[in-house]
Amino acid sequence: MKVSDTSTRPEPPFPGLVAFEATARLGSMSAAANELDLTQSAVSQRVLKLEAHVGQRLFVRQGHGVRLTGAGELLMETATDTLQRLRAGLARIEPYRNKQSLLLACPSDFAHGWLMPRLEALRAAHGGLEVWLMSERDVTAIDRIDVDLVVSRRPLQDADIECVPLLQDRAVAVCTAALAARLQGLGFPRLLDKAPLLFLESAPEWAGVIPPATGRSVRRRAATIQDERLLLEAAERGAGIAYVSQILAADALASGRCVRLAQVPASARPPLWAMRSRLTPRTPMADRVFEWLLAQA
């Protein structure tokens, strides 16, 4: 059996792969031509070159459209995956086209309660700034490719990273002003028997702040919620008392959507740190926004 030498075989025609994938996905060359901003003849020629390269027919004409052959179905699986990965890679480097962009990784509570209310002020202070905000990733390094700045409760220990304290945090009890008025004059923990309680799934007893119930206590558990942002929203809507990050609740407290119950003791939470690379930044915006964050905090 003769084994072909693939090392000298030419690379597959990339324009043909793009035209093939669009035609297969849309079901016709005319639709693919519209999507790719080409003529139908150009799409057809690119597909023909790809068929010549693989030595197989990839489509069978069917009415005004086309359907895949067996070989086409196999190639479509690979082409779809390959083009999706390529588009994802291009999207990843999209910020590099704009030197006024900034990639910031931070916890969702910081983004929701502290950064979002200041986002327009940040952009106003740095005209043309485009913020890429990543709030769901646990960043363990600053490689200046995926991220420019990091705000995190876990400081990164690396000689090439500058790590500066940004904000102290603590957990506080919050509820609506109307509910707080009803509880006025009641001490802790007695007030816990007079209002519905909201719990974070990961801290079912408010991280140990709630004392054990006595025989006379009547604790009403209104809800147990996995997402702390939803927990805060439930408190804002009057569902009960929630025990949340003060940083997360900062905007809600400042706007009066909820108030803090001073009777309930606060508890310390890990502080937030601001971090940047000591190496030359990808964009001058990295250093400017870093200093802005420290000044605002």
Image (cartoon, helix red, strand yellow):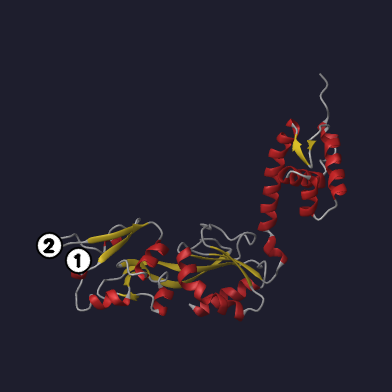
The furthest residue to the front: 63
Which class describes the residues within 10 Å of circle 2: few (<14), some (14-19), or many (20+)?
few
Distance CA(mark 2)–CA(mark 1) = 9 Å
* Residue picked out by circle 2: 216
Q: What percent of the width, then of the height, locates residue 70?
A: 73, 31
Camera-side residue: 263 or 156?
Answer: 263
Q: What percent of the width, then of the height, locates residue 178?
A: 29, 76
Using the image, determine if residue 32 lies above or below residue 278: above
Which mark is drawn over residue 193? 1
Camera-side residue: 253 or 212?
Answer: 253
The furthest residue to the top: 1
The reply to whether dot 2 and dot 1 touch (C-beta < 8 Å) is yes
Q: What percent of the width, then of the height, locates residue 134?
A: 55, 62
Q: What percent of the width, then of the height, locates residue 221?
A: 26, 59
x 33%, y 69%: residue: 238
Which class describes the residues within 10 Å of circle 1: few (<14), some (14-19), or many (20+)?
some
Image quarter of residue 277: bottom right
x 70%, y 70%: residue: 99
Using the image, determine if residue 184 lies above or below residue 193: below
- In this image, 261 relative to 148: left or right? left
Q: Amino acid at mark 2?
A: Arg
x 52%, y 76%: residue: 118
Q: Amino acid at mark 1?
A: Asp
